[in-house]
Image (cartoon, rainbow, N blue to C red):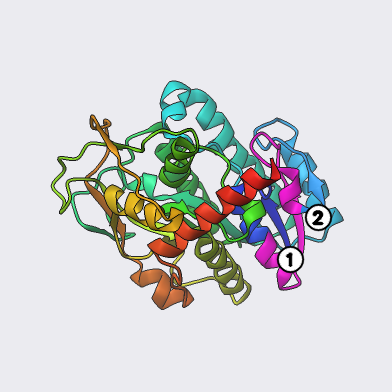
Amino acid sequence: MSVLVTGGAGYIGSHVVRLLEQRGDDVVIVDNMSNGIASRIGELPLEQIDLSHADATDRLVEVIERYSVDSVVHFAAKKQVGESVQRPLWYYQQNVTGLANLLAALERTGVDRLVFSSSAAVYGMPDRLMVEEDIDCRPINPYGQTKLIGEWMIDDVMAATGLNAIKLRYFNVAGTGWNDLADTAVMNLFPIVLDRDARGLAPVIFGADYDTDDGTCIRDYVHVKDLALAHVYALDALAAGRPRVSTFNVGTGQGASVREVIDALSDALGRTLTPEIGDRRAGDPPRLIADVTAISTELGWKAEYGLADIAKSAVAAAAWRAAQA
Protein backbone atom coordinates (compact mmCIF):
# COMPACT_ATOMS: atom_id res chain seq x y z
CA MET A 1 0.00 0.00 0.00
CA SER A 2 1.24 3.50 -0.86
CA VAL A 3 -0.42 6.01 1.46
CA LEU A 4 -0.50 9.79 1.32
CA VAL A 5 -1.12 11.26 4.79
CA THR A 6 -2.15 14.91 4.88
CA GLY A 7 -1.24 16.53 8.18
CA GLY A 8 1.08 13.59 8.81
CA ALA A 9 3.57 15.62 10.87
CA GLY A 10 0.88 16.47 13.42
CA TYR A 11 0.09 14.75 16.72
CA ILE A 12 -2.44 12.18 15.48
CA GLY A 13 -1.18 11.99 11.92
CA SER A 14 2.35 11.10 12.98
CA HIS A 15 1.05 8.16 15.03
CA VAL A 16 -0.71 6.78 11.96
CA VAL A 17 2.40 7.38 9.84
CA ARG A 18 4.53 5.42 12.30
CA LEU A 19 2.16 2.45 12.37
CA LEU A 20 2.04 2.37 8.56
CA GLU A 21 5.82 2.66 8.31
CA GLN A 22 6.31 -0.13 10.85
CA ARG A 23 4.17 -2.55 8.88
CA GLY A 24 6.02 -1.79 5.65
CA ASP A 25 3.68 0.52 3.76
CA ASP A 26 5.10 3.30 1.61
CA VAL A 27 4.17 6.67 3.10
CA VAL A 28 4.39 10.25 1.85
CA ILE A 29 3.36 13.19 4.01
CA VAL A 30 1.69 16.40 2.85
CA ASP A 31 1.73 19.08 5.54
CA ASN A 32 1.96 22.88 5.52
CA MET A 33 3.89 22.58 8.82
CA SER A 34 1.78 25.21 10.57
CA ASN A 35 1.40 22.75 13.46
CA GLY A 36 3.54 19.86 12.23
CA ILE A 37 6.93 18.88 13.67
CA ALA A 38 9.42 17.50 11.15
CA SER A 39 11.24 15.31 13.67
CA ARG A 40 8.08 13.23 14.12
CA ILE A 41 8.37 11.79 10.61
CA GLY A 42 12.12 11.26 10.33
CA GLU A 43 13.38 10.77 6.78
CA LEU A 44 10.00 10.05 5.19
CA PRO A 45 9.17 12.21 2.16
CA LEU A 46 7.47 15.48 3.11
CA GLU A 47 5.73 17.77 0.64
CA GLN A 48 4.87 21.18 2.08
CA ILE A 49 1.50 22.10 0.55
CA ASP A 50 -1.30 24.27 1.92
CA LEU A 51 -4.39 22.41 0.77
CA SER A 52 -6.51 25.58 0.79
CA HIS A 53 -4.37 27.33 -1.84
CA ALA A 54 -5.51 27.65 -5.44
CA ASP A 55 -2.66 25.49 -6.75
CA ALA A 56 -3.14 22.69 -4.22
CA THR A 57 -4.99 20.31 -6.54
CA ASP A 58 -2.33 20.48 -9.24
CA ARG A 59 0.44 19.98 -6.69
CA LEU A 60 -1.37 17.04 -5.08
CA VAL A 61 -1.88 15.38 -8.46
CA GLU A 62 1.86 15.61 -9.09
CA VAL A 63 2.67 14.10 -5.66
CA ILE A 64 0.12 11.29 -6.05
CA GLU A 65 1.51 10.34 -9.45
CA ARG A 66 5.17 10.64 -8.42
CA TYR A 67 4.72 8.34 -5.41
CA SER A 68 2.14 5.98 -7.01
CA VAL A 69 -0.29 6.70 -4.16
CA ASP A 70 -3.28 4.35 -3.89
CA SER A 71 -4.77 5.47 -0.55
CA VAL A 72 -5.13 8.74 1.39
CA VAL A 73 -5.63 9.56 5.06
CA HIS A 74 -6.76 13.17 5.45
CA PHE A 75 -5.95 14.91 8.75
CA ALA A 76 -4.90 18.36 7.56
CA ALA A 77 -7.36 20.84 9.07
CA LYS A 78 -7.73 23.51 11.72
CA LYS A 79 -9.30 22.17 14.90
CA GLN A 80 -9.58 24.77 17.69
CA VAL A 81 -13.21 25.34 18.60
CA GLY A 82 -12.70 28.80 20.11
CA GLU A 83 -10.60 29.94 17.17
CA SER A 84 -13.27 28.72 14.77
CA VAL A 85 -15.82 30.96 16.49
CA GLN A 86 -13.50 33.95 16.16
CA ARG A 87 -12.42 33.19 12.57
CA PRO A 88 -15.26 31.23 10.95
CA LEU A 89 -14.56 32.17 7.33
CA TRP A 90 -10.93 31.13 7.67
CA TYR A 91 -12.03 27.76 9.08
CA TYR A 92 -14.29 27.18 6.09
CA GLN A 93 -11.43 28.14 3.76
CA GLN A 94 -8.96 25.85 5.48
CA ASN A 95 -11.15 22.83 6.20
CA VAL A 96 -13.78 22.82 3.46
CA THR A 97 -11.77 24.27 0.57
CA GLY A 98 -8.79 22.11 1.54
CA LEU A 99 -10.91 18.96 1.37
CA ALA A 100 -12.47 20.04 -1.93
CA ASN A 101 -9.02 20.47 -3.45
CA LEU A 102 -7.98 17.04 -2.20
CA LEU A 103 -11.12 15.37 -3.56
CA ALA A 104 -10.50 17.00 -6.93
CA ALA A 105 -6.98 15.54 -6.96
CA LEU A 106 -8.31 12.08 -6.12
CA GLU A 107 -10.85 12.31 -8.94
CA ARG A 108 -8.19 13.38 -11.46
CA THR A 109 -5.79 10.60 -10.48
CA GLY A 110 -8.32 7.82 -9.91
CA VAL A 111 -7.29 7.21 -6.29
CA ASP A 112 -10.36 5.63 -4.74
CA ARG A 113 -9.54 5.08 -1.05
CA LEU A 114 -9.91 7.85 1.54
CA VAL A 115 -10.00 7.86 5.35
CA PHE A 116 -11.31 11.18 6.68
CA SER A 117 -10.53 12.64 10.08
CA SER A 118 -13.89 13.81 11.43
CA SER A 119 -14.95 14.65 14.97
CA ALA A 120 -17.59 14.12 17.63
CA ALA A 121 -18.03 17.89 17.33
CA VAL A 122 -20.48 17.13 14.51
CA TYR A 123 -22.97 15.97 17.16
CA GLY A 124 -23.14 19.24 19.09
CA MET A 125 -24.92 18.67 22.41
CA PRO A 126 -26.95 15.46 21.99
CA ASP A 127 -29.58 14.73 24.62
CA ARG A 128 -28.49 11.17 25.33
CA LEU A 129 -25.79 9.32 27.26
CA MET A 130 -24.43 7.15 24.43
CA VAL A 131 -24.01 8.77 21.01
CA GLU A 132 -24.76 6.64 17.94
CA GLU A 133 -23.65 7.59 14.44
CA ASP A 134 -27.19 7.87 13.07
CA ILE A 135 -28.51 10.59 15.39
CA ASP A 136 -29.18 14.08 14.02
CA CYS A 137 -25.94 16.05 13.82
CA ARG A 138 -26.27 19.59 15.13
CA PRO A 139 -22.80 21.10 15.57
CA ILE A 140 -22.65 24.21 17.73
CA ASN A 141 -19.49 25.84 16.37
CA PRO A 142 -17.87 26.49 12.97
CA TYR A 143 -15.25 23.78 13.54
CA GLY A 144 -17.94 21.12 13.93
CA GLN A 145 -19.81 22.55 10.95
CA THR A 146 -16.73 22.21 8.73
CA LYS A 147 -16.34 18.57 9.70
CA LEU A 148 -19.98 17.80 8.98
CA ILE A 149 -19.82 19.61 5.62
CA GLY A 150 -16.70 17.56 4.87
CA GLU A 151 -18.65 14.36 5.50
CA TRP A 152 -21.44 15.55 3.20
CA MET A 153 -18.93 16.38 0.46
CA ILE A 154 -17.36 12.93 0.70
CA ASP A 155 -20.78 11.22 0.64
CA ASP A 156 -21.76 13.13 -2.50
CA VAL A 157 -18.51 12.26 -4.25
CA MET A 158 -18.90 8.61 -3.24
CA ALA A 159 -22.39 8.60 -4.78
CA ALA A 160 -21.16 10.15 -8.02
CA THR A 161 -17.81 8.39 -8.51
CA GLY A 162 -15.89 5.28 -7.59
CA LEU A 163 -14.52 6.80 -4.38
CA ASN A 164 -14.56 4.52 -1.34
CA ALA A 165 -14.26 6.41 1.94
CA ILE A 166 -14.49 5.94 5.68
CA LYS A 167 -15.17 8.87 8.04
CA LEU A 168 -13.93 8.50 11.60
CA ARG A 169 -15.56 10.66 14.26
CA TYR A 170 -13.03 11.05 17.06
CA PHE A 171 -14.06 11.54 20.64
CA ASN A 172 -11.45 12.88 23.14
CA VAL A 173 -7.99 11.86 21.95
CA ALA A 174 -5.18 11.78 24.54
CA GLY A 175 -1.96 10.09 25.55
CA THR A 176 1.14 9.20 23.56
CA GLY A 177 2.16 6.09 21.67
CA TRP A 178 5.81 7.11 21.45
CA ASN A 179 7.40 9.87 23.52
CA ASP A 180 8.69 11.78 20.50
CA LEU A 181 5.16 11.98 19.05
CA ALA A 182 3.59 13.62 22.10
CA ASP A 183 0.87 16.25 21.90
CA THR A 184 2.82 19.47 22.37
CA ALA A 185 -0.19 21.77 22.00
CA VAL A 186 -1.67 22.82 25.34
CA MET A 187 -5.29 22.67 24.24
CA ASN A 188 -6.75 19.47 25.67
CA LEU A 189 -7.31 18.34 29.26
CA PHE A 190 -4.30 16.07 29.76
CA PRO A 191 -1.62 18.48 28.44
CA ILE A 192 -3.38 21.43 30.10
CA VAL A 193 -3.23 19.77 33.54
CA LEU A 194 0.41 18.69 33.07
CA ASP A 195 1.42 22.12 31.79
CA ARG A 196 -0.11 23.84 34.81
CA ASP A 197 1.54 21.35 37.14
CA ALA A 198 4.93 21.96 35.52
CA ARG A 199 4.44 25.68 36.23
CA GLY A 200 3.49 25.04 39.85
CA LEU A 201 -0.21 25.73 39.30
CA ALA A 202 -3.22 23.68 40.34
CA PRO A 203 -5.48 22.17 37.67
CA VAL A 204 -8.78 23.96 37.12
CA ILE A 205 -12.16 22.25 36.85
CA PHE A 206 -14.62 24.35 34.88
CA GLY A 207 -17.86 23.59 36.65
CA ALA A 208 -18.40 21.04 39.42
CA ASP A 209 -22.19 21.19 39.57
CA TYR A 210 -23.16 19.12 36.54
CA ASP A 211 -25.67 16.28 36.79
CA THR A 212 -22.99 13.60 37.04
CA ASP A 213 -21.79 11.44 39.92
CA ASP A 214 -19.01 13.81 40.97
CA GLY A 215 -20.41 16.99 39.44
CA THR A 216 -17.83 17.29 36.66
CA CYS A 217 -18.19 16.71 32.92
CA ILE A 218 -17.78 13.20 31.56
CA ARG A 219 -16.04 12.47 28.28
CA ASP A 220 -14.91 9.41 26.31
CA TYR A 221 -11.08 9.49 26.24
CA VAL A 222 -9.41 7.32 23.61
CA HIS A 223 -5.67 6.64 23.53
CA VAL A 224 -4.04 8.13 20.44
CA LYS A 225 -2.38 4.81 19.59
CA ASP A 226 -5.78 3.08 19.59
CA LEU A 227 -7.12 5.88 17.41
CA ALA A 228 -4.20 5.54 15.02
CA LEU A 229 -4.80 1.81 14.70
CA ALA A 230 -8.44 2.53 13.79
CA HIS A 231 -7.14 4.33 10.69
CA VAL A 232 -5.08 1.29 9.72
CA TYR A 233 -8.16 -0.91 10.11
CA ALA A 234 -10.11 1.56 7.97
CA LEU A 235 -7.48 1.51 5.21
CA ASP A 236 -7.51 -2.28 5.17
CA ALA A 237 -11.32 -2.32 4.99
CA LEU A 238 -11.22 0.04 2.00
CA ALA A 239 -8.62 -2.15 0.29
CA ALA A 240 -11.13 -4.99 0.54
CA GLY A 241 -13.87 -2.95 -1.21
CA ARG A 242 -16.55 -0.40 -0.41
CA PRO A 243 -17.67 -0.89 3.20
CA ARG A 244 -21.31 -1.42 4.08
CA VAL A 245 -21.03 1.42 6.62
CA SER A 246 -18.81 4.46 6.07
CA THR A 247 -19.13 6.54 9.27
CA PHE A 248 -17.76 5.37 12.62
CA ASN A 249 -17.32 6.72 16.12
CA VAL A 250 -13.86 6.17 17.57
CA GLY A 251 -13.89 6.00 21.36
CA THR A 252 -13.95 3.49 24.17
CA GLY A 253 -17.64 3.43 24.99
CA GLN A 254 -16.67 4.40 28.55
CA GLY A 255 -16.78 7.81 30.19
CA ALA A 256 -14.38 9.45 32.62
CA SER A 257 -15.07 12.63 34.57
CA VAL A 258 -12.69 15.56 34.82
CA ARG A 259 -12.02 14.61 38.45
CA GLU A 260 -11.24 11.05 37.41
CA VAL A 261 -8.77 12.31 34.79
CA ILE A 262 -7.02 14.45 37.41
CA ASP A 263 -6.93 11.47 39.79
CA ALA A 264 -5.42 9.28 37.04
CA LEU A 265 -2.74 11.90 36.38
CA SER A 266 -2.09 12.11 40.13
CA ASP A 267 -1.51 8.35 40.21
CA ALA A 268 0.82 8.55 37.21
CA LEU A 269 2.78 11.42 38.76
CA GLY A 270 2.94 9.73 42.18
CA ARG A 271 1.52 12.74 44.00
CA THR A 272 -1.86 14.32 44.52
CA LEU A 273 -3.09 17.11 42.30
CA THR A 274 -5.66 19.26 44.09
CA PRO A 275 -7.86 21.10 41.61
CA GLU A 276 -9.39 24.54 41.83
CA ILE A 277 -13.03 24.98 40.84
CA GLY A 278 -13.88 27.55 38.19
CA ASP A 279 -17.06 28.60 36.45
CA ARG A 280 -18.71 26.47 33.79
CA ARG A 281 -17.67 27.05 30.19
CA ALA A 282 -20.43 27.81 27.70
CA GLY A 283 -21.38 24.87 25.50
CA ASP A 284 -19.98 22.05 27.64
CA PRO A 285 -22.46 19.13 27.69
CA PRO A 286 -22.50 17.16 30.97
CA ARG A 287 -21.49 13.91 29.24
CA LEU A 288 -20.50 12.70 25.80
CA ILE A 289 -19.70 9.02 25.30
CA ALA A 290 -19.31 7.13 22.03
CA ASP A 291 -21.41 4.16 21.05
CA VAL A 292 -18.69 2.06 19.41
CA THR A 293 -20.84 -0.86 18.30
CA ALA A 294 -20.49 -0.06 14.59
CA ILE A 295 -16.70 0.13 14.42
CA SER A 296 -16.38 -3.05 16.48
CA THR A 297 -18.88 -4.94 14.32
CA GLU A 298 -17.87 -3.64 10.90
CA LEU A 299 -14.10 -3.11 11.24
CA GLY A 300 -13.23 -5.42 14.14
CA TRP A 301 -11.58 -2.55 16.02
CA LYS A 302 -11.81 -1.85 19.75
CA ALA A 303 -9.80 0.28 22.14
CA GLU A 304 -7.13 -1.61 24.08
CA TYR A 305 -5.92 1.16 26.41
CA GLY A 306 -7.76 2.69 29.36
CA LEU A 307 -7.62 5.92 31.34
CA ALA A 308 -4.65 4.83 33.47
CA ASP A 309 -2.67 3.93 30.33
CA ILE A 310 -3.41 7.31 28.78
CA ALA A 311 -2.32 9.14 31.94
CA LYS A 312 0.89 7.13 32.30
CA SER A 313 1.85 7.71 28.68
CA ALA A 314 1.14 11.46 28.91
CA VAL A 315 3.23 11.81 32.08
CA ALA A 316 6.09 9.75 30.62
CA ALA A 317 6.12 11.84 27.44
CA ALA A 318 6.10 15.09 29.43
CA ALA A 319 9.08 13.87 31.48
CA TRP A 320 10.89 12.81 28.30
CA ARG A 321 10.35 16.21 26.70
CA ALA A 322 11.57 17.98 29.83
CA ALA A 323 14.73 15.86 29.78
CA GLN A 324 15.35 16.83 26.13
CA ALA A 325 15.05 20.54 26.84
For the residue carrying disc 1, how many other residues have a C-alpha within 10 Å: few (<14), some (14-19), or many (20+)? some
The residue under label 1 is: 21
Residue farthest along the right direction in this orientation: 66
* Numbered label attached to residue 304: none
For the residue carrying disc 2, how many other residues have a C-alpha within 10 Å: few (<14), some (14-19), or many (20+)? some
Query: Image check: 265 left or right of 131?
Result: right
Q: Kindly tell me whether residue 1 is visible in this rendering.
A: no
Residue farthest along the front direction in this orientation: 271
Query: Image check: 247 left or right of 37?
Result: left
- Asked whether the residues under the numbered discs 2 and 1 touch, taking CB atoms below 8 Å apart as contact, a structural biologist would say yes
Q: State the separation of the CA atoms marked 2 and 1.
A: 9 Å
Q: Residue drawn at (66%, 33%), measured in percent from left and top?
A: 34
Q: Kindly tell me whether residue 172 is visible in this rendering.
A: yes
Magenta region includes residue 153: no
Magenta region includes residue 40: yes
- The amino acid at mark 2 is Leu
Magenta range: 18-41
Tell me if residue 187 comes above or below residue 168 in the rendering: above
- The amino acid at mark 1 is Glu
The residue under label 2 is: 44
Image label count = 2
Residue 126, given in percent of the width and then of the height, sits at: 23, 48
